[in-house]
């Protein structure tokens, strides 16, 4: 049975659907699909109601506690029992999953209402609800500061920087409302995206580091540098290096390098719609492999000025030795 086409405000589909049964056992937040994935035909309506309409599914999730049920279901074989093969794709926020839903590279977004409704309101995509969302309550979302911070009230957030996992998502929406309730205009605070799982590094002043990187890239672009090699780039966030550089030099070219396969997958998905951008595997410990990678050399011109970015990476690197290549 095909998934019944239901807009975001409509009830979830019948529990007789195999996908619905699997999701019902695990979903803690909103599960949505793009409208194009919900079409039906006369041929499909004649199928057995227990048949799986699409056995291979890619589900975009934010690596937060709300996604725990998804992993539990996969580990315990609930999907396999329902005739499904599920691939979990990590995204920084529900906002980041919207383009993938629209393009069809992601089948389901296990995200939050704020990003979904905003995307529909902007006309970016039409979405349909598959399963019920989790219910929020006091304490589910909180604005926190480090121990010993001079900020002790919401009013004192005026002029401060607040980290959120993504701009335009639920965290910003809820914080805006809290600020308004305490007489703090939204324009008087500055939001900085720090995607999961990097939130845990806030104690290491990641926010200041991100701000410095954006300023440094902008300065380099203003000096006429149009090529950037970002080694150890980590999960994409906003503003990314290419966004800052291309805002000043539209034809700037940026290469992102990381040794984490999951980071690269995430980066390639998010940067698929960007121009002048390349993401490839590489390890800071073996710089020759990066510099002589044929993709990097085709993309960048090493005879022209180039900005090398090693932001928040050197403190993870072992002391430099004579070894410059991997042991055979």
Image (tube, helix red, strand yellow):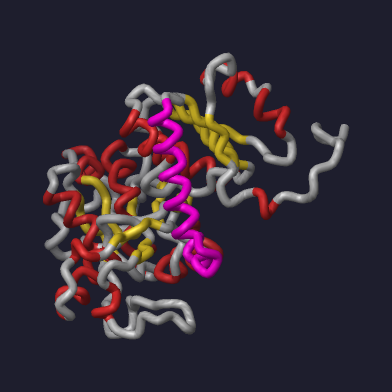
Res 163 quadrant in image: bottom left
Residue found farthest to the front: 223
Residue at the (58%, 21%) spot, across then down: 295
Residue at the (47%, 30%) spot, across then down: 254
On the picture, is 260 further left or further right than 14? Answer: right
Q: x%, y% of residue 37? A: 25, 43
Res 150 quadrant in image: bottom left
On the picture, is 97 further left or further right than 185? Answer: right
Q: Is residue 85 visible?
A: no
Is 151 rendered above or below residue 109? below
Residue at the (31%, 60%) spot, across then down: 191
The number of numbered discs placed on residues in the rendered structure image is 0
Q: Main secondary structure of the magenta part?
A: helix
Q: x%, y% of residue 247? A: 31, 33
Is 318 rendered above or below residue 142? above
Q: Nearer the viewer, residue 54 or 326?
A: 326
* Residue 186 covered by magenta stretch: no
Res 116 quadrant in image: bottom left
Residue at the (32%, 38%) spot, across then down: 104
Q: Nearer the viewer, residue 288 or 21?
A: 288
Q: x%, y% of residue 298? A: 55, 16
On the picture, is 326 further left or further right than 100? Answer: right
Q: Quadrant of the C terminus?
A: top right
Report the magenta residues as a range.
Answer: 198-223
Q: Is residue 247 visible?
A: yes
Is 147 rendered above or below residue 260? below
Q: x%, y% of residue 80? A: 49, 57
């Amino acid at each position: 049975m095909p998934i019944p086409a239901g807009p975001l405000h409509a009830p979830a589909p019948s529990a007789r659907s195999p996908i619905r049964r699997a999701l019902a056992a695990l979903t803690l937040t909103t599960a949505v699909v793009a409208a194009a994935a919900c079409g039906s035909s006369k041929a499909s309506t004649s199928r057995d109601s227990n048949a799986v309409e699409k056995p291979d599914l890619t589900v975009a999730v934010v690596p937060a506690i709300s996604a725990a049920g998804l992993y539990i279901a996969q580990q315990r074989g609930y999907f396999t029992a329902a005739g499904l093969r599920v691939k979990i794709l990590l995204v920084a926020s529900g906002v980041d999953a919207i383009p993938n839903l629209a393009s069809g590279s992601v089948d389901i977004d296990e995200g939050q209402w704020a990003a979904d409704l905003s995307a529909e309101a902007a006309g970016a995509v039409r979405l349909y609800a598959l399963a019920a969302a989790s219910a929020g309550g006091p304490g589910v979302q909180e604005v926190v500061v480090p121990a010993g911070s001079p900020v002790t009230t919401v009013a004192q957030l005026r002029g401060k920087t607040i980290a959120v996992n993504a701009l335009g998502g639920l965290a910003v929406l809820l914080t805006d409302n809290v600020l308004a309730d305490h007489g703090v205009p939204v324009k008087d605070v500055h939001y900085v995206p720090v995607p999961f799982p990097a939130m845990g590094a806030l104690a290491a002043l990641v926010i200041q580091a991100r701000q410095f990187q954006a300023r440094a890239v902008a300065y380099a672009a203003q000096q006429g540098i149009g090529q950037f090699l970002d080694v150890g780039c980590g999960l994409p966030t906003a503003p990314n290096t290419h966004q800052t550089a291309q805002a000043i030099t539209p034809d700037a070219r940026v290469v992102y390098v990381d040794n984490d396969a999951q980071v690269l997958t995430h980066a390639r998905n998010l940067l698929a719609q960007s121009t002048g951008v390349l993401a490839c595997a590489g390890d800071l410990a073996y710089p020759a492999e990066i510099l002589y990678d044929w993709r990097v050399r085709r993309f960048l011109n090493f005879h022209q000025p180039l900005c090398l970015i090693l932001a928040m990476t050197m403190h993870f690197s072992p002391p430099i030795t004579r070894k410059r290549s991997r042991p055979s």
